[in-house]
Image (cartoon, coloured by chain):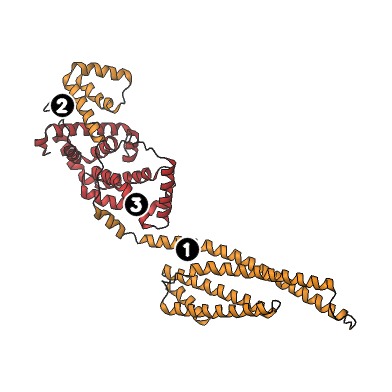
Amino acid sequence: MTCDLARERIGGLVDGDLDSAARAELHAHLATCASCAALAEDLEIVRRASRSLPTLDPPERVWTAIARQLPVQAINRSASRSREWVKVTLAIAAVLLAAVAITMLVRRGRSVESQVAESASHAMPSPAQPGPQPGAQSADSADLKSLQSELQQAESHYENAIQKLETLAKDRRTLNPQDAAILQKNLLLIDSAIGESRAALKAQPANDMAQESLFEAFRSKIALLQDTISLINEMRKGNQAEAARIADGLNKS
Amino acid sequence: MPPSNRTDADNAAESALVARCRQGDAAAFEAVYRRHAPRVFSLACRMTGSRADGEDLLQEIFLLVHRKLDGFKGEASLGTWIYRLAANCCVDFLRSRQHRDRQATDELDDAVTPARSAPGLRVEQLDLERAIERLPPGYRAAFVLHDVEGFEHAEVARLLGIAEGTSKSQVHKARLKIRAMLASRPAMGL
């Protein structure tokens, strides 16, 4: 083997790329040629030293510069929060649907009940039997209990939805003080209406008006909280026009 | 690339960190930076042969990481993903400078001859770093990726857009030049 050929192959030897025959041939040459042997040894030293070079620590100013250029992050966070809000809102919508369904069942039950009572009063107005039969009294009591239970269930669904919305609507830092004050005032009014309806319903559990008034107050509170969340979202997105439109609606409500 | 001994716990911790980054958690992104920046910075400095360019590239790479993190599928480790992104950025940077440096490369090619002035090559880390800095950019890129960073020639060739044989040839020539520079330190200003 000539020195020229040996020098060509030394790179392969250092990389471990040579097959056994070529390696043996090269080693035979290196054993007799000090110059080529020194070259092979040095290149191996360079390769090993290069592989063990330490990592370099960047100066702190690089991170400072990067951190300064990450306002995009806030936008991503906002978008991510919006996605989370959509999920929560969908969950709340499902809860509300259940509440509305139960409310309708309660109303239908009440309507059938009053029709039965009305037809019964027309069919049997007998002075000889002024009071209801013992069996009928027991059935009425069971119906009332069932009605109260369904009412409580609907109320609990509304309260659940309201609680979740209140959590979302709590962070009102992005709102201007005027809008925040109007929201607070409206919420207090609705809470007061809820309290009054509850008190009326407690005194007269079968009172249609009190029941409807309570559910109406719940629906108003949910609508107000949903508007609050939309307003916070639009403010965060920097969508001033849409935010102003929602705020205007809140002022009128 | 060097093998990584990753455990399930490492993978879980990394997934959690990536999830936090995607949610816009700045502290999580800083943790990613602190963990991976030194390796990326080393690669960028050595590939470009300049700490100033290394700093600029490090900044550019991590802003890119931040933008592209949503596309990270977790098929490789986060470190590997960042590192490949970094290697591609470094190569793009070198390509953008290539036409400017070609003349200097040719001159340096002719100026350095392989030689050994004394038996047994002595390698000081600082001298080696300086010798790598003085390599022609094409040789330096292949040498850093292969000998310093541990990529296979096939991978170096793919990253640099050259033939595998060219990668082998460039790495070999880079070693010869480094040997010559280290063997004649005063003459080379090392």
Q: Which residue is mark 2?
A: B120
**Dot 3 or dot 2, earlier in sequence:** 3
In red, which chain?
A: B
Q: Which residue is mark 3?
A: B31
Viewer-nearest residue: B128 or A150: A150
Q: Is residue A106 left or right of residue A3?
A: right
Q: Amino acid at mark 1?
A: Ser
Q: Is residue B161 left or right of residue A238?
A: left
Q: CA distance from mark 2 to mark 1?
A: 66 Å
Q: Is residue A172 left or right of residue B189?
A: right
Q: Position of residue A27 (x, y in %)?
A: 25, 18
Q: Position of residue A63 (x, y in %)?
A: 28, 54
Point out the frontmost of discs 3 and 2.
Answer: 3
In orange, which chain?
A: A
Split into 4 quadrants, where in the image is the N terminus of chain A? top left
Q: Chain of mark 1?
A: A
Q: CA distance from mark 3 to mark 2?
A: 43 Å
Q: CA distance from mark 3 to mark 1?
A: 25 Å
